[in-house]
Amino acid sequence: MDRQRRELTFLHSRGGFLRQSPAPPPDQAIAESSCSAGDRKPPIREVDFFSSGNRSKLSSDEEESKNCKGRSTSTLSDPGTGLNLLSLNSGTTAALEDDPSNNDTEMRMLRLELERLHEENRRLRSMLDQITKNYGHLQAQLLMAMQKQAHLNQREQQRDEMTTMSSPTKSAQQLMDLRPTCAAMDNANDEEKTREVSDSPTTTMEVMSKESDHIHTPPLNHPNNNHNIEDGDRTSQSWGSPKSPRLEPSKGGDEQLADPPFRKARVSVRARSEAPSISDGCQWRKYGQKMAKGNPCPRAYYRCTMAVGCPVRKQVQRCADDKTILITTYEGNHNHPLPPAATAMANTTSAAAAMLLSGSTTSKDTPTSANPGYFPSLPYPSTMATLSASAPFPTITLDLTQNHNPMQLFPRTPPPASATFPLPLHGYAAQIMGQLQHSMKLPAMPLVQLGVGQRHASLVESVSAAIASDPNFTTALAAAISTVMGGAPPRNGPDGNSNANNNNNNNNSGNNHFLPAGVGVLPGSPQLPQSCTTFSTN
DNA sequence: CGACTTTGACCCGCGC
DNA sequence: GCGCGGGTCAAAGTCG
């Protein structure tokens, strides 16, 4: 646990890199085999760490490097472990220098081997860069295609409604209802987006974020949409507040507005916490509290105040059955950089939301409401991650309250071939899975980029299987959350979340571990597509 | 004084 | 149409 915490802390501090790095290669398991299980380190992290010139990690890993010394020679001979081998360089070099018995020939061979591995590493990294670029281009193209399709559908429906509706006021309302998405789908915007995609030197994730904003919410940072920032309190209604009628026309009508990217998903996380709150690193302001039916504990409503107009909200409530369980709900996408402490949670839950949304694409017509498990036929325990499309929102529940033994909980049957984590999951999910793989020390899950045509169907199964079948996912998620919770001393920092007068369980959560500006901040993550993280009330 | 919490009122969707 | 419940608003109060 301490190790996981340390790694996650490191992940936070190295957030910028991690978010720009694709998921670990499938041969990670092979690469990790060069050290004993206890010495395993995510190899790609090490490589990038080396290249980034950050030496502090060296000292922290000095002991592990020493542990690897004895094995360095034999390990070096494995050409398939190039990435990881570089992490042993210091130990290897030290071993070579410390042992005068090595003859020159052996030294030369080892150095040659080292150089070869360096070269191979460079080659692999360039390949990785290329793949990342291609991936970004494909994502952009896919999104643009989806947007155009949605735009066409919208215009069709708009035309239909204009002809069928006799009431002028109703028609006007319809037009208003469609405003957010129509504005986002404007041709001018399309052109601009095209330019963004093709010309912008931003990272893939940044492109994705911009695209997501165009799709799901009026782009908050768009000069033509400043009203959304100024009108921040209303943003939730404009992008589909539960009580908002604006997106309701999709109900019972065409499925165009129910297109997955426009649907609102929830990610529900149940976490056991004696503390009054879960510190997720964000800054929240309480704007309401209600007594929910069937629960003696009030439900508190919070709004993200880290940026003006940030549409993210969360609900916090204790479980009626077990008051040590905190059920917290996040909704919406941050429109601002997140501190590292918040990034882990945001990324994880966004990934879960993305999974859910992707999965709900093809299953929206299936009767899932009464079924707590989205895929009841799965042969895996689904107690830790449950997908549900129950009204009004599809919800994914991550139950972190159960004390799972990762060894025992490995799927009784091997995951099906589809239990992969497709990259098109908005990128982040794959990254997070990569991170989780690191922290879970799992054999690498194959990351398969599916073709667009087979995306959704496979996605549903893949994601569900990946989550439901792999308790380590939520175990690592729990580790991440416990890092946030445990690593955050109960203080009322600059976030201003003073709970002294909070006589309820409304925890607010706000302790921020702010780093200097830009350090470890994920530029893209706040705009994750439909990242609605819900600590659900079930 | 600004930021935050509290809390009653209000809005809206939904079911009957 | 009405009532219920979830979600939000906004004025008043609190705190540092």
Image (cartoon, coloured by chain):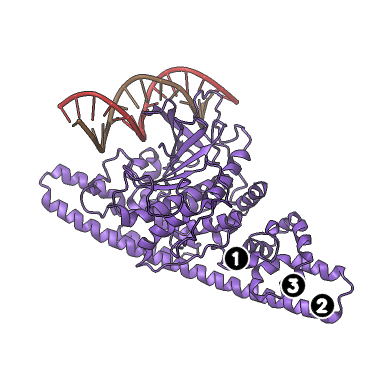
Chain colours: A purple, B brown, C red
Q: How far is mark 3 from mark 2, CA to CA? A: 14 Å
Q: Position of residue A340 (x, y in %)?
A: 58, 47
Percent position of residue A291, x then y: 39, 26
Q: Residue furthest bottom?
A: A105
- Horizontal side of A420 relative to A38 (left or right) equals left
Q: Is residue A191 visible?
A: no
> In the image, which disc is placed on residue A74?
3
Check disc 2 and report the residue beneath it. Answer: A107
**What residue is shown with label 1?**
A28
**Which numbered disc, 3 or 1, marks the residue closer to the eye?**
3
Q: Nearer the viewer, mark 3 or mark 2?
A: 3
In this rendering, the answer to whether C1 lies above or below A270 is: above
Residue drawn where x is 28% and y is 53% of the image: A182
Place residue A268 in its image quadrant: top left
The quadrant of the image that shows the C terminus of chain A is: top left
Q: Amino acid at mark 2?
A: Met
Q: Secondary structure at mark 3?
A: helix
Q: Closer to the camera, A163 or A113? A: A113
Q: Nearer the viewer, mark 2 or mark 1?
A: 1
Amino acid type, residue under disc 1 in the picture:
Gln
Mark 3 or mark 2: whose residue is earlier in sequence: 3
Chain of the residue under label 2 = A
Q: Is residue A318 above or below residue A419?
A: above
Q: Is residue A175 left or right of residue A499?
A: left
User: What kind of element bears circle 1?
Assistant: helix
Q: Is residue A18 visible?
A: yes
Bin the neighbour count of mark 1 within 10 Å (Cα to Cα): few under 14, some 14-19, many 20 and up. Answer: many
Tell me the CA gap for discs 2 and 1: 28 Å
Report the disc number at residue A447. Answer: none
The residue that appears at 49% across and 61% down in the rendered structure is A414
> The disc labelled 3 sits on which kind of residue?
Ser
